[in-house]
Image: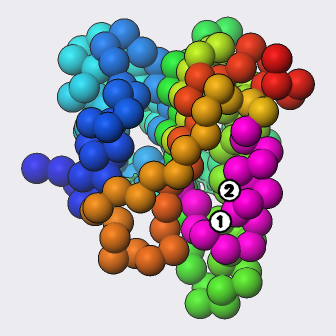
Amino acid sequence: GYRSRAAYKLMELDDKDKLIRPGMAVVDLGAAPGSWCQVVVERLKGKGRVFALDLLEMHPMHGVEFIQGDFTEDAVLQQLENLLGEQPVDLVISDMAPNMSGMSVIDQARSMHLAELALDFAQHWLKPGGNFLVKVFIGSGFEELVKTMKPQFDKVVIRKPKASRDRSAETYLLGLGAKRDGKTGV
Ligand code: SAM
């Protein structure tokens, strides 16, 4: 079985957009407890690499190289980058969500910040043509994030998998086809 129901969201997104293919290098941010990793590992069919990161511990998984740490810390990012070496990746997926404080302004700002950091990472590490999937909450900062992403990808789409229907503000942004130089959109 899957470690979390989040698995069904990624399966639905991947069934529609064909994000995961054997041979790929994939980075999973906010990976614990690991159900997205399970889906990625299954769909890579033993060919490819998976790098995962989370604040929390994650039970080890065959085929996944895991780092425990806070993605907002430079030292942790550096650890992940060391693991990648010089190899760009095909797909970056981020399901990161902050611990909810209950104060919506703060929670929204924190979650947008995580999404922006994930986008920066994707911009640096995706191969041209690579894809980026990120969880976001519709609210303050959402439109700006979409605007920032647009020049960096051939196409940016909003996806709301059925499995997250009950979580009203939760949605996923998908950047398809990373441009060679995302900073200038060329
Ligand atoms: N996709 C996962 C799965 O399928 O098992 C579920 C991810 S869960 C919704 C969100 C995760 O983001 C939590 O495990 C949380 O610890 C992680 N997270 C939140 N802030 C983080 C940060 N700053 N650095 C790393 N992970 C973070």
Residue that badge 2 annotates:
114
Q: Is residue 79 visible?
A: no
Residue 10 rendering spot, x and y as whole percentages: 33, 45
Left or right position of 150 against 136: right
Residue type of the residue flagged with mark 1: Ser
Cα separation between marks 2 and 1: 5 Å
Left or right position of 93 against 17: right
In the displayed structure, would residue 55 be above or below residue 87? below
- Segment tinted magenta in the rendering: 134-150
Q: Nearer the viewer, residue 152 or 69?
A: 152
Count neighbours of disc 1 (C-alpha within 10 A) and say few if under 14, some if 14 to 19, many if 20 or more.
Answer: many
**Extreme residue in the bottom direction:** 103
Left or right position of 69 against 13: right
Left or right position of 133 against 36: right
Count neighbours of disc 2 (C-alpha within 10 A) and say few if under 14, some if 14 to 19, many if 20 or more.
Answer: many
At horizontal 55% and vertical 44% (from top left) the residue drawn is 157
Q: Is residue 102 visible?
A: yes
Residue that badge 1 annotates:
111
Residue 186 rendering spot, x and y as whole percentages: 82, 17
The residue carrying mark 2 has its beta carbon less than 8 Å from ligand 1: yes
Residue 46 figure quarter: top left
Magenta residue check for 100: no
